Image: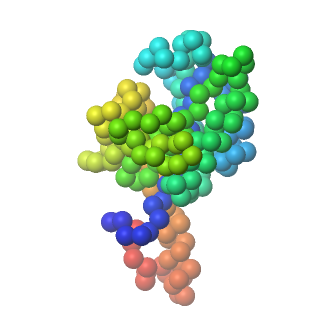
Amino acid sequence: MPVAGRREDAILFLGALFSSQKVFDSAERELTEAFGKVLFRGPTLPWNFSDYYDTELDPPILRNFLFFDALIDPPSLVDAKLAAMEIERKFSENGKRLVNLDPGYLTLAKVVLASRKNYSHRINLGRGVFAELELFFKDGRFNPMPYTYNDYRDKKFLEIFDRARLLLKKSLARQHQAVCESKDSGGQGGLCCPL
């Protein structure tokens, strides 16, 4: 159960849309320089949920997600969105992005996505960045909201987020165990409460 005032453990992720695997691989190198080691890279999957990006990205469009290893403070999503936009600019030609990068964060309870577009269900985080609750965890799985994007509702993409959540949960358990063992002078870890 969350404790009032306690920071929520979250990991940053980037959802990428692209039509060239080579461009995405180059962008991934930039992203790891900006955000650190990748905890989990999802599979590259076809993306055909809308024609919104067709003129910019030239179909067929592909989707991939990168989940980063380090825990972040959720308000840092603003900086992540602005940094992702800079990387998008580096991979643009004639004013068209060659990769679309949408950062968000994942916790054990939810998936939150950053946006530059305001709407009734989005929360202003400052500096022109808004947050949208995309998925919430209930009944052993992530579930969509009424406004959740169609690809975030898709079974294949939900499985990616479920897997990333499991990796986060294991990482938090390891960190918790290490803290417990360091507090327990006998090295048993038995005095620390369970996660």
Residue nearer the viewer, 124 or 64: 124
Q: What quarter of the picture does the C terminus occupy?
A: bottom left
Residue nearer the viewer, 162 or 73: 73
Q: Residue 19: x percent and y percent? A: 61, 18
The outermost residue toward the left is: 139
Q: Residue 114: x percent and y percent? A: 50, 41
Q: Looking at the image, which residue is at 60% across and 16% down?
A: 56
Residue nearer the viewer, 56 or 60: 56
Q: Looking at the image, which residue is at 60% across and 45% down?
A: 80
Please state if 182 lies on the left or on the right of 157 as rendered: right
Please state if 64 lies on the left or on the right of 143 as rendered: right
Please state if 79 lies on the left or on the right of 135 as rendered: right
Q: Looking at the image, which residue is at 57% across and 46% down?
A: 127
Q: Is residue 46 visible?
A: yes
Residue nearer the viewer, 21 or 167: 21
Q: Is residue 107 above or below residue 7?
A: above
Q: Looking at the image, which residue is at 50% across and 37% down?
A: 115
Q: Residue 83: x percent and y percent? A: 66, 42
Please state if 97 lies on the left or on the right of 124 as rendered: right
Q: Residue 47: x percent and y percent? A: 48, 20
